[in-house]
Image (cartoon, rainbow, N blue to C red):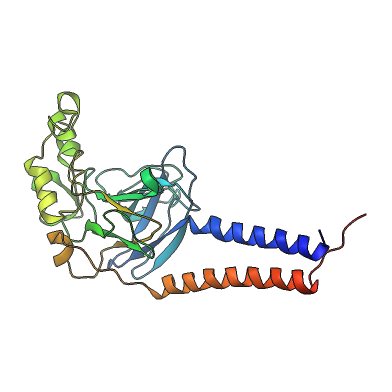
Amino acid sequence: MAPSTQFSTTFLTLCLFQFLGGSFSSTFTIVNKCSYTVWPGILSSAGTSPLSTTGFVLQPGESNVVGVPPAWSGRLWGRTLCSQDAAGKFSCVTGDCGSSAVECAGGNAAPPATLAEFTLNGAGGLDFFDVSLVDGYNLPMIVEPQGETGGGNCTATGCVVDLNTPCPTELKVMSSGDGVACKSACEAFGDPQYCCSGAYATPDTCKPSSYSQFFKSACPRAYSYAYDDGSSTFTCASADYTITFCPQLSTSSIKSGNPVAMETSGADLDGRYNNVMSVIGCVLVAFVATQFGALSLPVSQ
């Protein structure tokens, strides 16, 4: 094989491999629209590749984009009312992960906390995601698929209302005189019938309680108890996801369970344009190398 042809073939193969490999990964765009600071926490499930970060800070109005490897599964949540003591120990009133640092480093969210849960590239090649209040609630959150969102029940889900104020007194978490989180009945009472454990560990024996119905009536698409699968799990194919704390949008559609219209953002369009241009660039460079030998490499004898 001529040097220029050999180079062009190798270059084109590597270039396209890099492009196609990247197309199977996703991004999480995490946005804070709350009027207060939020410290997102991220926990990867056992056996999946960790993300580049496990925790960071978002001031009001800030966002952060995190790359997600293929077949990732895990959860994401927001921590609130966080501070660092004189000894340098970091802790949060809600959603604390016990790491004593901004990075959670494998720590899970202490309940109560609103959770976004993901299994990407799961059964049938689909992404499965939900917003769960099974471990309680600490702030509003919505998950919105972006980009190529075909496949399954692909629409936004979450809990966009403030439940800390109307939370039942026996579930309410107080701090400085204010309600800052709302426990699940399982966390508050430890009763197997609320925890779906023991004699109540099956869908047939564990039924919605008045407490889980409080969460479900306010947030119909969110998980309200362990076996609330039918109306609370969503699926997409090849999507990116925007996770927004305190979303500033009309809540009528998501509270009623109707589809939420999604717009393609400028960032999505820019990303698709850049991908297309990358492929065109690969082909052009390989063509030049083949036809003119402009990029031919010396071959050792």
Quadrant of image for the C terminus: bottom right
Picture layout, residue 116 above or below residue 270: above
Specify the quadrant of the image occupied by residue 196: top left
Left or right of residue 214, residue 99 in this image? right
Q: Residue at x 6, y 43 (%)?
A: 210
Instruction: Give the residue displayed 39% in from the left and 59% down from the top.
Output: 239
Q: Residue furthest right?
A: 301
Q: Is residue 115 visible?
A: no
Number of on-image labels: 0
Residue visible at 17% across and 45% down in the picture = 224
Frontmost residue, 212 versus 204? 204
Q: Position of residue 293 (x, y in %)?
A: 80, 71
Report x, y in % for residue 222: 20, 51
Q: Is residue 27 visible?
A: yes
Extreme residue toward the top, this view: 199
Residue 161, position as x, y percentages in the image: 17, 61
Q: Residue at x 16, y 65 (%)?
A: 253
Query: In the image shown, does 249 or 114 lie closer to the viewer?
Result: 249
Decide which of 203, 244 is in the foreground and name it.
203
Q: Quadrant of the N terminus?
A: bottom right
1 relative position to 68: left or right: right
Res. 62 image quadrant: bottom left
Q: Position of residue 67 (x, y in %)?
A: 48, 57
